[in-house]
Image (cartoon, helix red, strand yellow):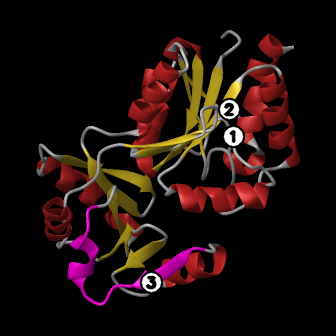
Amino acid sequence: MHKPKMIICDIDSTLVVKHQTLTPRARACIEKLRSSGVYFGIASGRPLYQIREGYDMWGYDDFDLTIGMNGSVIWDNIDKKEYNYYVMKKEWLKETIELMAPFQTNPSVYRTDSQIFFKEDETLKLYAQFFKSKVEVAKSIEDLYSEETAKIMFRLENEEDMPKAEKWIAEHPNPNYIGFKTQPSLIEFCDKRVNKAYALKKFCEMHDIDLKDVIAFGDTTNDNEMLTESGVGVCLKNGSDDTKAIADYITDKTCDDDGWADFTEKYIMPFIE
């Protein structure tokens, strides 16, 4: 371990408990890192407009880098520029809906300022209460593939079906897009060329940062590339088995117990001070 030039974190179940604010301990770590010249960024499967709602709740304007939509979009707060990368074509979106037909799911997609679900469920109700942005029910299944978008999500009605769904997806590979778990009951599909590591590399290239000087934190499958491509990859104690397997370190505590801040204080701050 050495002083990093940048730290990048997944949000839910890594930096914060889902839909909750930063703890005072985490905020103190972030502020100390940034005041010491270490860039700080977050990476998420959410769109930028939804991530910015989190910034508002946390009391920040922005961090140095925001990666959204699993790497399909970034906000470079140093240069004040947004960059968009690969999206899912309409025919690919339709194909994924057909692929996931054997499972009971509620597919959804993001639009410019809203999220569209195929049907109303508890997740939709929760999002409608929690986020300021619009949450809508599709008029028909065709609405979900009427426009290109960065990704499509499938919420499994039975979390126990996840191993079967992952196996099914692995048995039906596609040259254009990939499917992966992002939460215990959520699978997402996006263009095969894009992931959080792809967006991180773009940012680092623009600002002359060597990836070996980046420490990345995550907790599940859509963080794996980011952890392996960074100089140091850290998985939270509550993380999934596949992410723990590729990580250089696993935190001593879970996200619920401020695992990110605890690791940062113990193993990174000695190189900052």
| Rendered view: 203 above or below 272 | below
Q: Name the residue under label 2.
A: 40
Q: Residue 236, can we see it?
A: no
Horizontal placement of 149 versus 54: left or right? left
Identity of the amino acid at label 2?
Phe
Quadrant containing the C terminus is top right
Residue 56 is one of the magenta-drawn residues: no
Q: Callout 3: helix, strand or loop?
A: strand
Q: Position of residue 190 (x, y in %)?
A: 29, 51
Region of the chain picked out in magenta, as a range: 133-148
Q: Mark 3 points at which residue?
A: 136
Residue 254 found in image quarter: top right
| Rendered view: 259 above or below 35 | below
Horizontal placement of 266 versus 220: left or right? right
* Residue closest to the eye, 51 or 240: 51
Q: How far apart, in angstroms, are the residues tagged by discs 1 and 3?
A: 29 Å
The residue drawn where x is 53% and y is 14% is: 208
Q: Residue 210, can we see it?
A: yes
Q: Residue furthest front?
A: 80
Identity of the amino acid at label 3?
Glu
